[in-house]
Image (cartoon, rainbow, N blue to C red):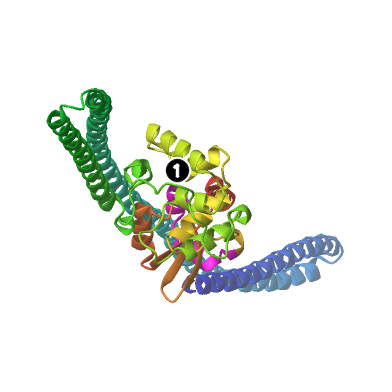
Amino acid sequence: ETAQAAVAEKDQRIAALESVEAQLKDALERTAQLESAQAAVAEKDQRIAALESVEAQLKDALERAAQLETAQAAVAEKDRRIAAFESVDAQLREALERIAQLEAAQAALTDKDQRIAALESVEAQLKDAQERLAQLDAVQAALAEKDRLNSKYAAELNHVSAEARALQARVETAEEQCSKAELEKKMLLGEVEGLNLRSAETAELKSRIVKLEAELEGERARALRALRARAQKLESEQSPVTTSAPPPHMRFLEEPAQEGPVPSPPLLRQDKARGPHDVAAVVNSTRGRGPRRQVGEILVAAGIMTREQLDESIRMQVADPHKRIGQIIVERGYATEEVIAATLAAQLRTRFADDIEREMTAEAMRMVPQNIAINHRCVPLSYDSGQLTVAMANPLDLIAIEDLQHATGAYIEIVVATPTAIERVVNKYYLKINAK
């Protein structure tokens, strides 16, 4: 504002000087006119002098005196104007110097404003970089923890697998001994039938057979108990929320199923149970009747797959422990993803979400970071009173649940959805955003 006021004052002074300059030009023009008139008068005087010399001389003297007086007045006026112009010129130089100083200050101020704007932009970039670095540090720590847990569980799983193979070999050896004992039993029974007179020896042989059978049965029971205890211990360390059931690749350790067909639950016929709701009905009808049933047993009881198909799926999972039993069943075409997801949800006493995209809310999506949704393949659905509902294909992924709790600070409720639905939503919303 000071600079603008100075500029306005400068403009006023320049206008005044321009007015003075215009007056000077007018005076000079008038002087030129007077000089021209003077020349004309001189010429006339010369002519009159030729006619009237005395009168001309007198008049010439008078005119000369008047001219000198006029010239003297003009010189005084010019001196006055020159003094005024010199004063204005000094003021103009001072004003120009002041303007130059103000222009330099204004240029410096503009440069400082630009520098401040650049520094503010750098500061914003620094804050963004620090936040990104903090996020990357958290992700790196989580990945390190996951690697540690994976290494730990892989080592324990290898150890258990080795023990299982060793115990299986012992069971096979025991079964082989049982077969030999059976053969020996038949041979001894033949000898007993042929030697009726040797009853004492026959009794001794029978007691020996009974003893061998008891030892064989005890060895088998001990092996099964050891394997079951080891499997339950590993499962309790990996998935604390599902300690009531052995992992899928250890299902051959369960108690031998009772002979004969599996009875259908009340109010549900096997030949009609074909969908997710029928599977849920089977699970609900069997609650409170002992240990929680496995997914494969529920599907067999619901009539969706046969016992032979379940056994085949279990054998394939033993050969490839990295696959879940539900994935194998879907790949073999024994059941659909929806049926497997509904079975898992009913088994874990949670809900099966058949249309997660319809349940998604913007509030829930904003709470879950994009990297967590992509890495753990989870879809936030809704948030209400401190509880965040999240859809997952694997509701037993404890690392994903822990990351969600740490990132949102909310209580996490897991509902089950199919892997295809989860993948479709993640690709549509999160990977599309990432690509942009």
Magenta residue span: 359-378
Q: Is residue 422 above or below residue 222?
A: below
In magenta segment, residue 241: no
Q: Is residue 226 above or below residue 318?
A: below
The residue carrying pointer 1 sits among few (fewer than 14), some (14 to 19) or many (20 or more) residues within 10 Å by Cα, namely many
Kind of residue indicated by mark 1: Ile
Q: Position of residue 418 (x, y in %)?
A: 54, 51
Q: Main secondary structure of the magenta part?
A: helix
Q: Which residue is mark 1?
A: 325
In magenta segment, residue 373: yes
Q: Position of residue 127 (x, y in %)?
A: 36, 57
- Name which quarter of the figure residue 57 lies in: bottom right
24 sits left or right of 96 in the view: right
168 sits left or right of 414 in the view: left
User: Residue at the location (26% across, 24% down)?
Assistant: 190
Tell me if I can see residue 272 in this picture.
Answer: yes
Q: In front here: 56 or 429? A: 429
Q: Position of residue 26 (x, y in %)?
A: 71, 68
Q: Position of residue 244 (x, y in %)?
A: 32, 57
User: Residue at the location (25% across, 30% down)?
Assistant: 178
